[in-house]
Image (cartoon, helix red, strand yellow):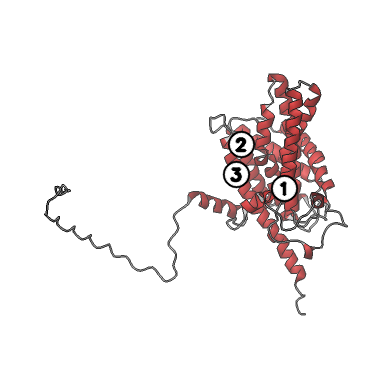
Amino acid sequence: MVEPPAESGSTAQAPPAPAPPPAAFAPPAAPGAAPAPAPNILRDLRTKLFKLLELPEIDDVPIRHILLSGFTRPDKYEPAEETFAVGTPRTTPPLAQVATEWPRPRVYWHILLGTLLVYFLLRLGFTSFENINFLPGTLVVGAFLVPLAVVVFFFEMNTPKNVSVYQVGKMLLFGGTLGLIATLVIADLIRGSGTGELVPALLTGVIEETGKLTALLLIAGNARYPWILNGLLFGAAVGAGFAGFESSGYAFVDLFGSGDLSNISLRAFLAPFGHVIWTGMIGAALWKVRGKRPFEFGMLLHPTVVKRWLVAVILHGLWDTRILHTTLPIQQIIIGLVGWLLIFAILKEGLSQVAAESKAGAAPPAPA
């Protein structure tokens, strides 16, 4: 029971407060021992997933530094054109000159902001001036502007600089189209795909991820591209082409069905979280297994390829499943962030591969 305070002017002294009870005995911590970290369920799940997929941890990956390099002053000015002047036999640097630290991609921001401006100008011409001639450009640029920027990001992250813009463009356009055709063929063989419910959505993931993997076989046998980062780039290019053509088709149908262009804006916003990174995961896995060996179809059944293909399928299926009943794309953003955690682990894996090869090439030969 708490006693009331003494009245004002009283000379009585309050009794001293009782001494606190002695603390319970605890043995002293061992010298240099750190306190046990609090349990973190999400971190534990991430660790288990990375271990299952044989991916490195990403605690030391400078994600913010990588993504926001375009807004910082470069140490050395380099024209944007120089970024794309690589990848031919004459312009591919020797392995000893390849940077092994984390790149600072910048040009992809220029591509994104530039094409975004073009899109708004085209849309202005179509909506404000009611000029139908602006419609095709609005649909195409709106569908491809974000996927293209993400591909440029992976192009800049490809530190061996052994892939040309021509090869990327071929995989984006021809590979993306072939992926769509292969998807239609597989969909005729596997019935029951759809969206909304989990099982049909997972079947959609199986069909589309297999179709895009088929397109990667166009270049899987080329010995000039042995790196994990190459496979990640080619996979992203196929996924970007697939996403761009798919989005423009949906936008066309929606426009003439409801007269609404909002679908293409939403799909552009979500583009970095979907097809581009899903196919990139699969491409990186296939190139990791292939390495410098000739391609064999049996590599498609290697556990590394199968597991990462399965992860892409699951992410794709969850994306198409209606879990959160909200009009906001919260579910898709969460799924996309999980995908990007995997992508940064793959980037670290790819850079480590290049660094190890560069170090081995620079090391003196072992004595006989």
Q: Secondary structure at mark 3?
A: helix
Q: Is residue 367 left or right of residue 343?
A: right
Mark toward the start of the polypeptide (2 vs 3): 2
Q: Mark 1 and mark 3 in contact (Cβ < 8 Å)?
A: no
Q: Residues within 10 Å of mark 1 (few under 14, many from 20)?
A: many
Q: Nearer the viewer, mark 2 or mark 3?
A: 3
Kind of residue indicated by mark 2: Trp
Q: Residue at x 67, y 57 (%)?
A: 349
Q: Position of residue 339 (x, y in %)?
A: 62, 45
Kind of residue indicated by mark 1: Phe
Q: Position of residue 213 (x, y in %)?
A: 74, 43
Disc number for residue 153: 1
Mark toward the start of the polypeptide (3 vs 1): 1
Q: Position of residue 320 (x, y in %)?
A: 62, 34
Residue at image mark 3: 337
Q: On screen, 307 above or below 141?
A: below
In the image, 94 versus 339, the foreground residue is: 94
